[in-house]
Amino acid sequence: MVLFSVISFALIFLDHRFDFMDPVRFTLSVVTAPVQYVANIPAQVASWSHSSVRSRSELEEENARLQSEVLVLKRRVQKLASTVAENTRLKELMNASDLVDDEVLIGEIIGVDPDPYRHEAIVNKGAGDAVFVGQAVLDAEGLMGQVIEVGPFSSRVLLISDISHGIPVHVNRNGVRAIAVGSGKLDQLKLIHVPDTAGIVRG
């Protein structure tokens, strides 16, 4: 035991004075480096796994937050669109009222004719509201129809789209006069007695 101690001290002294152990240490470091790298792999994997799990959790939380914000924004857009549409409708109704010099009576449709070939509607205004036969009925887009029957509290309106309805019209652009008759379709009218040179086109 004493002999090993003496040899160890001698080697330490000689290495300190002459550095003859450097090649040995270099060789040992080359041999042990892969072992140290492999031994460190579990710690590196554990660190990477923890970071990956944390990053995925953070991404899921961020995704959930963004989805909630999108839903809130969609609700706001829908509410804004509804408000704009209502304001536009009210403005159109006001403009339609301004086109008429006489006093305007505002009513509501409370029924329609069940016959698909008759375009008639029932409004909640009648003789008690000074409604009379032949009175024009307007909506937000202009002329809607004409009163054909008056009751005490309601009236029947013939819509301009009914095939039995006709009304004189005037084209402001060129002064041409014609008759607009119903086509049986709610969104279409027909012009009759129009000269070929009138310059009127579809739409």
Image (cartoon, rainbow, N blue to C red):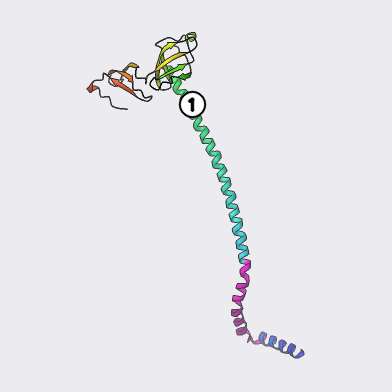
- Which range of residues does the magenta coloring cover? 16-43
Is residue 75 among what the camera can see?
Answer: yes
Give the x, y percent position of residue 11: 69, 87
Front residue of 21 and 178: 178
Give the x, y percent position of residue 21: 63, 85
> Is residue 137 highlighted in magenta?
no
Q: Is mark 1 on a helix, strand or loop?
A: helix
**Which residue is the extreme one toward the front?**
115
Q: Which residue carries the number 1 mark?
A: 87
- Residue 41 is left or right of residue 181, and the answer is right
Instruction: Report the magenta stretch's main SS.
Output: helix
Q: Quadrant of the N terminus?
A: bottom right
Front residue of 9 and 65: 65
Give the x, y percent position of residue 144: 40, 19
Residue 168 location, quadrant: top left
- Amino acid, disc 1: Asn
Determine the residue positioned at 61% across, 57% down: 53
Determine the residue positioned at 46% across, 23% down: 91
Q: In which quarter of the image is the C terminus?
A: top left
Determine the residue positioned at 46% across, 26% down: 88
> Is residue 40 highlighted in magenta?
yes
